[in-house]
Image: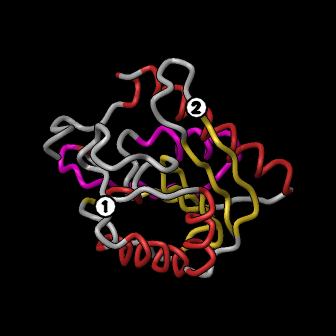
Amino acid sequence: MRTYPDGYQHTVWPDHVERVAASIDFIGTWVTESGMTLDSIADLSCGDGTIPREVSVRTSVDRLVLGDINQQSGLHIVGPLPDTLEALTPAVDLYVCSETIEHMDDPDFLLQQLRLKSKYLFLSTPVSEPLHYGNTEHYWSWSVDDMSQMLIEADWSPVDHMLFIAESDQTYTFQFWMCA
């Protein structure tokens, strides 16, 4: 809330615009190629909600559940993860966890709780970011192998992943995961 007192807007930074677009394309491609039908998508740390909103339009999702920690967001579910997950009833088909897990006190617990609330998970986080590199709000960083192991230990089955580097700012490499 201190960083984005008026709510997060991904369009402020070109690298965020690129990452959000790549996330939407990655999810959309996976849904199309898998032949899966999504009836519901949730993201309780959505900021401006662009990823779940765009995916829901592209995949004709009926139920979209958005939340955020920022009181100014105007969203129905407001508060920190994983506390707000109990408000996610019934469970959803896809949960979007974009650039969130590295900010959590207990990322393993969050992944376990998300498993109880969702059939599928999209996860995005930086790859092997040196802590204290630039974002003091990032408490954790994982290699691709470490993240794969974390997902498996939380009872997720990683079915696809890719690495992404924004052309406008090549500071970070991001790992995108689709899990069932």
In percent of the image, x 61 and y 37: which residue is there?
Answer: 164
Nearer to me, 103 or 54: 103
Q: Residue 51 in magenta?
A: yes
Q: Residue 79 in magenta?
A: no
- Please indicate whether residue 51 sits to the left or right of residue 10 in the image: right
Label 1 Cα crowd, 10 Å radius (few <14 / some 14-19 / many 20+): many
Q: Where does the magenta region start and end?
A: 49-72
**Height in image: 163 above or below 143?**
above
In percent of the image, x 64 and y 75: which residue is there?
Answer: 156
Q: Amino acid at mark 2?
A: Ile
Q: Give me the C-alpha separation between circle 1 and circle 2.
A: 31 Å
Residue bearing the label numbered 1? 77
Relative image position of residue 168 (x, y in whole percent): 50, 18
Q: Secondary structure at mark 1?
A: strand
* Mark closer to the observer (1, 2): 2
Nearer to me, 145 or 99: 145
In percent of the image, x 39 and y 30: which residue is there?
Answer: 10
Label 2 Cα crowd, 10 Å radius (few <14 / some 14-19 / many 20+): some
Q: Amino acid at mark 1?
A: Ile
- Residue 121 image label: none
Residue bearing the label numbered 2? 165
Nearer to me, 22 or 65: 22
- Please indicate whether residue 179 sits to the left or right of residue 95 in the image: right
